[in-house]
Image: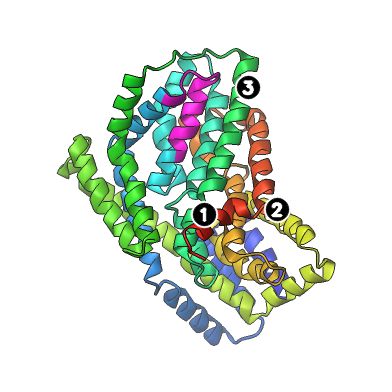
Amino acid sequence: MELLILIVSFFILLIIGVPVGWALGISGILTLLTGLDSMTALTTFGQQFMTSLDSFTLLAIPFFILAGQIMNRGGIAQRLIDFAKSLIGSLPGGLAHINVVAAMLFGAIAGSSVAAASAIGSILNPRMKEEGYSKEFSAAINVTSSSMGLVIPPSNILIIYSLASGGTSIAALFIAGYIPGILTGLFLMIIAGVWAVRKKFPVGEKTAIKKILKSFLAAVPSLLLLIIVIGGIVAGIFTATEAAAIAVVYCLVLAFYYREISHKDLPAILMSSIATTSIVMLLIAASISMSWVMSFANLPQDISAALLALSDNKIVILIIINLILLVVGMFMDMTPAVLIFTPIFLPVVAELGVDPVHFGIIMIMNLCIGICTPPVGTLLFVGVSIAETTIVKVIRPLLPLFVGMLFALLLVTFWEDLSLFLPRFFDLM
């Protein structure tokens, strides 16, 4: 009964246009009201809502958001594009490959797929149009490649998964994301190359070694952020939260060094970061509260028992969970999806011997596909808006790219060393 009230009320609220954060909170309260009086239900939910944000780990999120905002305006995107162009611009579909590499690098550095899509798309889309690429293909490759910034660290969503999973090592999760993220990018590049050959898009000229070195040196200060943040966390020099604060200082120094921003730009950057942080924290608080309500109603245990009753075969269960997460990702934002479904599915896969780090990468890769798909694909809306086209027109070039992302997901799901090799190598597990 509780599960029915929870699901039905949540989706009705979404259908009538209630924002996701409020829909989560209201449906959670309605579910509590089935077993508690109104005052107790409201008080209990309110307490859970407030205490859910009382976490030192969560401090990393506003810092990474602020670092991403500074990077988005600090001239970093252009330098990464120039570096990517010098490396792979001469391949068939050169600009598409540049989009993939630059979006993955920028998304990883900024920790935000939306920032990557906005920064890289706004620079490359006009160039791709000049060389004969359709607006729809430009949007499709920009959207799918930008999503990988959530798998390649540093990533806010991996921090949230660590919280939802009960403290899985953030350092291990960060390192685990590299191979799956790069693998997905390679599949996207292969598909983009085949598409470019079929459509006879122009091929760029080969870049001289001297120019490659020059573009690399220009990009080195930006790329160093990854080494500082990830290297510091892996080496145990500082925590993820401390690393996020260091990232803000470094990005600020870098932006002033590039002379892309001035002190007059800081109020706008701070206000934009505050607005984004407020939305994210509302979603986190509402989602964690919803998870508590589900635990109170014993729903995770019931769902786990139902899944294990279907089969005790790890492959079958992982396929079922992947299918559920793919559907969930189409209708729910990534943050609440991770916070709600991690406590449900993690105990199931843990009982079957799946490592929490491995499952975290599987879950994030699933939901990365979700944010690129209608009807609630936030990244898709951003990419389409930047390319000045429509979702309906973008679907066709998106489909083969989805196939590449799904193939990468299947490889990572059933070949755990793709995500666990690096954490084991650095002795993080």
**Point 36% across, 26% down: residue:** 82
Label 3 Cα crowd, 10 Å radius (few <14 / some 14-19 / many 20+): some
* Left or right: 149 as drawn, with respect to 410: left
Q: Position of residue 321 (x, y in %)?
A: 71, 59
Q: CA distance from mark 3 to mark 1?
A: 32 Å
State whether residue 107 is above or below residue 297.
above
- Where is mark 3, residue-wise? 195
Task: Look at 63% across and 28% down and name the residue there.
Answer: 397
Q: Secondary structure at mark 2?
A: helix
Residue hosting label 1: 422
Figure quadrant of the N terminus: bottom right
Q: Nearer the viewer, residue 317 or 306?
A: 317
Residue labelled with disc 2: 414
Q: Is residue 152 above or below residue 60?
A: above
Residue type marked 3? Trp
Considering the whole magenta stretch, tell me its main secondary structure.
helix
Mark closer to the chain start, 2 or 1: 2
Mark 2 surroundings within 10 Å by alpha-carbon count, few (fewer than 14), some (14 through 19), many (20 or more): some
Picture quadrant of residue 299:
bottom right
